[in-house]
Amino acid sequence: AQKVTQAQTEISVVEKEDVTLDCVYETRDTTYYLFWYKQPPSGELVFLIRRNSFDEQNEISGRYSWNFQKSTSSFNFTITASQVVDSAVYFCALSWAGGTSYGKLTFGQGTILTVHP
Amino acid sequence: GAVVSQHPSWVICKSGTSVKIECRSLDFQATTMFWYRQFPKQSLMLMATSNEGSKATYEQGVEKDKFLINHASLTLSTLTVTSAHPEDSSFYICSARVSGTRETQYFGPGTRLLVL
């Protein structure tokens, strides 16, 4: 069975602070994908990143960065110099990469991020 | 980029009625689509996998007779909530996997259902 845990239910920061959202996953599969999605109040899921289990390189995209550590089964997300527009619910998700199961995402509980001006 | 649409975006209905939600891939073919449900302030839970031309596969605990899924074409999957009750009120989101790929999928904007 797959499981994704986002231990932080809510995080509140002041604009320009850096913030890290934690994600820990469990899977018996050797090949899998990890994702982060942003869900603003409108409800639509905004894709942020997909990471293959064989690629442990960290990634940076603008103010966003991701730290994938297979040894600790973690895929943490950092926002540098946070902005009010970053306020949203962020979901970490996991998908098995084999067969026809790709696309069946197991989501974490989500972290509500509030950035105050 | 690829777009997935859902219709309607929101719907209010009376208890006991049926509601149909459409999920369309607008510029690509999707052999497989997925339906998720999200209750307020909760996470997304996979309900079922919709396969074009065959029966849907439901996750454990999801009533197949209550949530009818039809995937009649490569660009359209429908979810019908039959005899809806207030506890079915939720946010329903579909995703579509691009045919011929294993890695590419897109989410729809979601449909908010309120059953009175």
Image (cartoon, coloured by chain):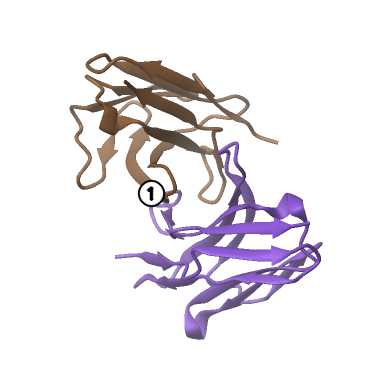
Chain colours: A purple, B brown
A103 is higher (above) or lower (below) than B11: below
Q: Is residue A61 left or right of residue B68?
A: right
Disc 1 marks a residue whose amino acid type is Thr
B21 is higher (above) or lower (below) than B50: above
In front of the other: B96 or B35: B35
State the quadrant of the C terminus of chain B.
top left
In front of the other: A106 or B112: B112
Q: Chain of mark 1?
A: A
In front of the other: A22 or A73: A22
Q: Is residue B83 left or right of residue A69?
A: left
Residue B98, horizontal then vertical, whole percent? 54, 38
Name the residue beneath numbered marker 1. Answer: A100
Q: Quadrant of residue B115?
A: top left
Residue B19, horizontal then vertical, whole percent? 34, 17
B7 is higher (above) or lower (below) than A55: above
Residue depicted at 51% across the width and 37% down the height: B99
Q: Quadrant of residue B40?
A: top left
Residue depicted at 75% across the width and 53% down the height: A84
State the quadrant of the N terminus of chain B.
top right
Residue depicted at 81% across the width and 62% down the height: A62
Residue B53, horizontal then vertical, whole percent? 33, 26
Q: Is residue A14 left or right of residue B34?
A: right
Q: Is residue A96 visible?
A: no
